[in-house]
Image (tube, helix red, strand yellow):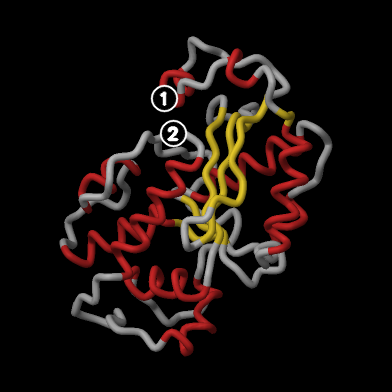
Amino acid sequence: MIGKMISPVTWAQYLLANGCVIVDVETTGTDTDAEILSLAAIDHKGNILQRELVRPKRPIDESGGAFRVNKISNAMVAGARPWPHVWLDLKVLLEAHGVIAGRTPLVGYNVGFDWRMVVQSSQLYWEDVAVYAAKIQLACAMDQFGSYQRMLNPDARKRYKLADACKMIGAPPREFHREDQDCLAVLDLLRYMADRAIDVAGDWKSIPDLEAEVNLISRFTKPWTVRNPDESVL
């Protein structure tokens, strides 16, 4: 990780100018036995790359906390494909967009959790997805939005729920925890921050030379360093 700091504004501008893949997953929980129930991926222009429900290996606990949040039931996933088939398609699109090679960042709201769920769900089927972690560049929109708020107010919170963040910026209403809707909400946040060229104290950069920012890709959060990957902010 390089020492030079870039602002959340520059970060968002870079992603929108150079491209990224935004992902979101819904799961059966947050523990080490949790599985992915839905997956969505879009590009930096809002084009849907993949969107589908996933049939887990074990039944969904419809009395659990995760179900109360995402409302994905056993009946809803009964006809869905199991994770190994979904992963094969996801792998192809990540390769096609340069994510696995490390050229294009993988963005999410608490993306460390999303990636941990990809690895964890794959391991249930003896698929070693963790081998791709060496090059994949994870970029956390939740961290950057928290940093943006602290640029405006040093006493602001470090983390916000996605729905709260979108409400704060006046983004269009969305049905959160529904496949591509969370991805599109993250894109709303990126566009909002990218439009804000704010003069602040210190070394934050307000109006970037995007070509000069290419070398700053290494500052994007590396896999397994996004705080504690066991944490999920619903």
- Confirm or deny contact between disc 2 and disc 1 (CB under 8 A): yes
- What mark, if any, has residue 190 been given in the picture? none
Q: CA distance from mark 2 to mark 1?
A: 7 Å
Q: Is residue 1 visible?
A: no
Compared with 46, 198 (above or below) is: below
Q: Nearer the viewer, residue 27 or 130?
A: 27
The residue indicated by pointer 1 is: 69
Q: Nearer the viewer, residue 172 or 151?
A: 172
The quarter of the picture where the C terminus appears is top left
Task: Give how far across and how far down residue 15 sits, in percent.
Answer: 47, 69
Give the secondary structure at mark 1: helix
- Residue located 43% across and 41% down the image: 181
Q: Residues within 10 Å of mark 1 (few under 14, many from 20)?
A: some
Task: Give how far across and how far down residue 186 sits, in percent.
Answer: 40, 52
Task: Give how far across and how far down residue 92 sits, in percent.
Answer: 75, 54
The residue indicated by pointer 2 is: 177
Amino acid type at circle 2 is: His
| The residue positioned farthest toward the front in the image shown | 47
Q: Residues within 10 Å of mark 2 (few under 14, many from 20)?
A: many
- Does 121 sit left or right of 198 as displayed? right
Task: Give how far across and how far down residue 98 sits, in percent.
Answer: 67, 67
- Does 141 sit left or right of 112 as displayed? left
Compared with 3, 168 (above or below) is: above
| The residue positioned farthest toward the right in the image shown | 126
Amino acid type at circle 1 is: Val
- Does 210 sit left or right of 156 as displayed? right
